Amino acid sequence: MNKRNFAFDRMNYILLAIGMAVVIIGFLLMSGPGSNETAYNPDIFSVRRIKVAPVVCLLGFVSMIYAVVRRPKTDATEEKEGAE
C-alpha cells in the first residue's frame, strides 16, 4: 500500500497519545476530596485544582489539535512524482 493513502503517520499517533496522557494527568490533578453538607474542605480551592490542572489540560488539548492538524512529511521523490 502507498503511504500517501493514510492521513496520519506514526508521529501523529505518538503526539495524539502524548496529548491524551497530558489531558488525563490534568484531570487527575483536578480530582480530590470535595466538601459535603457537614464538613467544609478548603482544598477544593487549592492552586493545584484551580490553576495548574486547567492549564495542564489546555496544553494537552492544544497538543492534540496540533497532532491532528500536522501534515506527515513526504520525501522529495514523492513530491516530484506527484508534480509530474
Image: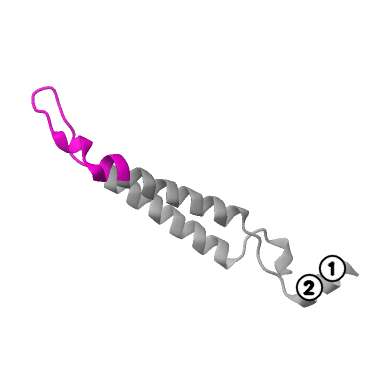
Instruction: Give the position of the C terminus as an image quadrant.
Output: bottom right
Residue at the image position 62 percent from the left and 58 percent from the top: 70
Residue at the image position 84 percent from the left and 73 percent from the top: 80
Pointers 1 and 2 in contact (C-beta within 8 Å): yes
**What's drawn in magenta, residue-wise?**
32-51
Name the residue beneath numbered marker 2.
78
In percent of width and height, residue 27 lies at 33, 45
65 relative to 72 in the view: left or right: left
In percent of width and height, residue 71 lies at 66, 60
34 relative to 10 in the view: left or right: left
Name the residue beneath numbered marker 1.
82
- Name which quarter of the figure residue 39 lies in: top left
Q: Which kind of residue does numbered mark 2 sit on?
A: Glu
The answer to which of 42 and 74 lies nearer the viewer is 42
Query: In the image, is residue 48 above or below residue 41?
Result: below
In percent of width and height, residue 41 lies at 13, 33
The answer to whether residue 38 shows anywhere in this view is yes
